[in-house]
Amino acid sequence: MKLEKVMLMYRAQIPATTANLGPGFDVLGMALDFHNLIEVEQIESGLEIEVEGLGEGELPVDEDNLAYQAMDFLFTRADYTPPGLRIKLINRVPLARGLGSSATVIVGGLAIANHLAGQPYSKAELLNFATELEGHPDNVAPALLGGVVISVLPEEGGVVYKELGSPQLSTVVGIPDFMLSTTEAREVLPAQVAFSDAIFNSSRIALLVAALMTEDYQLLSLCFEDRLHQSYRQDLVPGLEEVIKETKEAGALAVALSGAGPSIVALTLEKEELVGQRMVQTFAKHGIAADYKITQPAVEGVLVEEIE
Ligand code: HSE
């Protein structure tokens, strides 16, 4: 039995995410079809961590590593003690860009730890753990479940969520060449907002959910508007307002800050290259180097497989 445990090795594939989807601050998120990988092997003793790809040589490779912390969080609750762990992070999701890189690591770490511990927890319980670690559910929910997810955090009890599936749209992300921590991007938000701004957002969230459910994508332009966070983050993302305006003019249906930024996400049925190029050109006008990536909503959330 012990020998069998030592041999176990799992690989998790976890999608990038874009949170908020315009007005859905801390509530809506969507999985994107590019992924981070985490491989974990049980070894006889100790902790070995390797980072390959983005963040190599920068991210911690000791007990401060976020994947390890997520695994340890679950092991503690499950009262499971692995002999030793070898963890390899294969990172392709840009770090601190509003594309859910930390959510991939938290969700991947929890999902593999759950397998190693004998799957004591359901997806709903993993979502609660991930939300506790991340602080808000809107990135971790789609990273875990795939597609678009609505997550509500009641005052008591765990996250209540509903999966909306994946819209049949292309997604273009404009990725500026600088990092922005979510903590910093949340510090600029006000403690209170105007009643009219609350109505502005709640009306658009309601319409956005209906538009996605009925595939009425022409409504998305209106539904992606926001007054709860984007304008407050304008100074942290030079050119934000103009990039959104220009990207829409280039043919995108809907454009918003992706999560806490600094990336911009556009949903479109056409002209993906033009949309991406316009994002990059407009950022350049504001002195910001950027790149773009054409992708699509990811149907699946985290997938864990046992490997040789
Ligand atoms: N809803 C969060 C925020 C997402 O906008 O701060 C962080 O990625």
Image: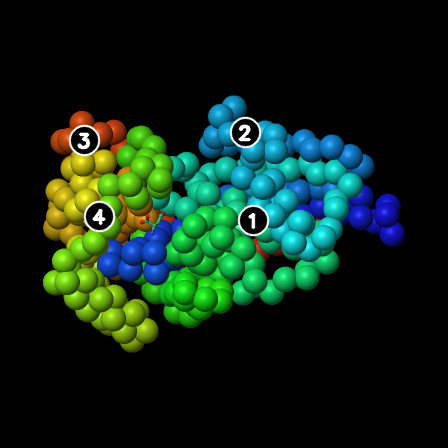
Q: For numbered disc 4, what is the local secondary structure?
A: loop
The image position of residue 276, as x and y in percent, is 25, 43
- The part of the image, by quadrant, that contains residue 223 is bottom left
Q: How far apart are labels 3 and 2 at the CA level?
A: 32 Å
Q: Which of 88 and 196 is in front in this view?
A: 196
- The part of the image, by quadrant, that contains residue 182 is top left
Between circles 4 and 3, the one closer to the viewer is: 4
Between circles 4 and 2, the one closer to the viewer is: 4
Question: Residue at the location (78% across, 41% down)?
Answer: 83
Which residue type does callout 2 highlight?
Pro
Precedes in sequence: disc 4 or disc 1: 1
Q: For numbered disc 2, what is the local secondary structure?
A: loop
The mark found on residue 284 in the picture is 3
Precedes in sequence: disc 2 or disc 1: 2
Between circles 4 and 1, the one closer to the viewer is: 4
The mark found on residue 108 in the picture is 1
